[in-house]
Image: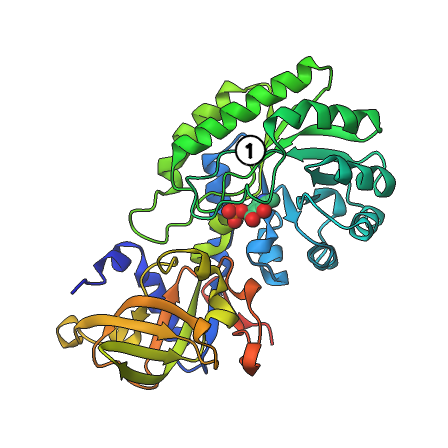
Amino acid sequence: MNTLDPIIRHGFADYKHAFKQFSDKPTPYMVTDLDKIADNCKQFKHHFPSVELHYAIKAFYTKEIIDSIDDRVDGFDVASNNELKDILSYGVAAKRIMYSNPVKSKKSIEEAFSLGVDKFAFQSMSELGKLQMNAPGSSVYLRVKIDDSHSEVPLSGKFGCEPKDVVRLLTHAKNINLNPVGITFHVGSQLLDSTAWESAVKKAGELLVKVKKAGIDVDTINLGGGLPAQYFTDDPTIDKLSPSINNALLKNDWTKYIAEPGRFIVADSSFIVSSVIGVEKRGQKNWAFLDVGLFQAFLGALRYKKFPYGPIVSDDYLREEPAKRADLVPFIITGPSCDSEDTIHYEALLPEDLSIDDRLIFPNTGAYTLVYGSSFNGFEVPPVYFLKDQKVFSRE
Ligand SMILES: Cc1ncc(COP(=O)(O)O)c(C=O)c1O
């Protein structure tokens, strides 16, 4: 059967070390390495020196995370007033916050504006009406539909105006005394293909030129999110993707660039540890029941054809000498609730002697995991332990 060598190449040694520090904690829990998050911001700035970095906090945020990257990012992107109020309470200045959700309630806009936010995304005439009334004079960025069919998580069904409407919408924004600044797009989350970035940047540049020709003084392209995490060894790294994206950026050298990565910043900072609570052979299939499932942490896996976060590792793999490890066989992995939808993986390779109380480690689970979590059936969202300078601390 398949071996786990790719994980070792992937830097799994770090997890091994961290896992040992937490092996006495009750499961389930997540471990988040704050230094890794700060380093990912550094990597972004290094590879995209001409792009302002605004972290999209929706991917995962706590005060500890925001504190550890505050001086490494240019700003933050929020999707709701609760996100906004949280990061304001952590000490982030309102002027560094961009409200990137293109459809907001009147009340949210009014409150955000009263709290000092003056940068908003929009995608329609009706949103402009709300912004005119509730956030007069604000800077606005038009969300444009861009081809996101190459990404693992397309977003353009719900978001973005048609390119043909760009001039009309930005002209109207100016006419109602808002401050049209530029356009924003999202290539879709976990985009592995750099050519899709290149054509999105090219298209955005062409649209901005049209808008400028219509007499609107716009100069900014917000590249949104989409930068991938390396869940599997074949997924491209930032070293591989950045040269061609930067080439595309250079072609519009008169523009200012902003990006709002979420997943790339936090995905590989964290791992979730769970215990096996039941093992059964159902028909011909091996089933492992865990103390964490879809509802608490893995709802994000639903939209993927295969389990998206990369290989899962058992503590057998970490503790034993290679020669003593059991063979790996396919398992269906399901969560603890009384709902069959709770199943998260249909072909996980795990030791054939997997037993109750064995621990499973899910690497690369920092982005879009606990933030989706609910305590359905009374099973709580796992607590988080943080690592900083190799030291452990928890929020409780
Ligand atoms: C407006 C906006 N910006 C940024 C992001 C972050 O995207 P990603 O996590 O793919 O980098 C999202 C994700 O949905 C988004 O909707």
Outermost residue, left side: 323
The scheme the figure's colours follow is: rainbow
Residue 194 position in % (x across, y down): 40, 34
Q: Nearer the viewer, residue 13 or 311?
A: 311
Outermost residue, front side: 283
- Quadrant holding the C terminus: bottom right
Q: Residues within 10 Å of mark 1 (few under 14, many from 20)?
A: many
- Quadrant holding the N terminus: bottom left
Q: Residue at x 44, y 24 (%)?
A: 247
Q: Nearer the viewer, residue 303 or 197?
A: 303
Q: Residue at x 49, y 57 (%)?
A: 367
Q: Is residue 194 visible?
A: yes
Q: Nearer the viewer, residue 108 or 343?
A: 343
Q: Is residue 156 left or right of residue 271?
A: right
Q: Is residue 105 left or right of residue 64?
A: right
Q: Is residue 233 left or right of residue 326?
A: right
Q: Residue at x 56, y 26 (%)?
A: 204
Q: Residue at x 56, y 58 (%)?
A: 60
Q: Nearer the viewer, residue 380 or 339?
A: 339
Outermost residue, top side: 213
Q: Quadrant of residue 117?
A: top right
Q: Is residue 78 left or right of residue 14?
A: right
The residue pinned by badge 1 equals 51
Q: Quadrant of residue 173?
A: top right
Amino acid type at mark 1: Val
Q: Is residue 69 above or below residue 342?
A: above
* Disc 1 secondary structure class: strand
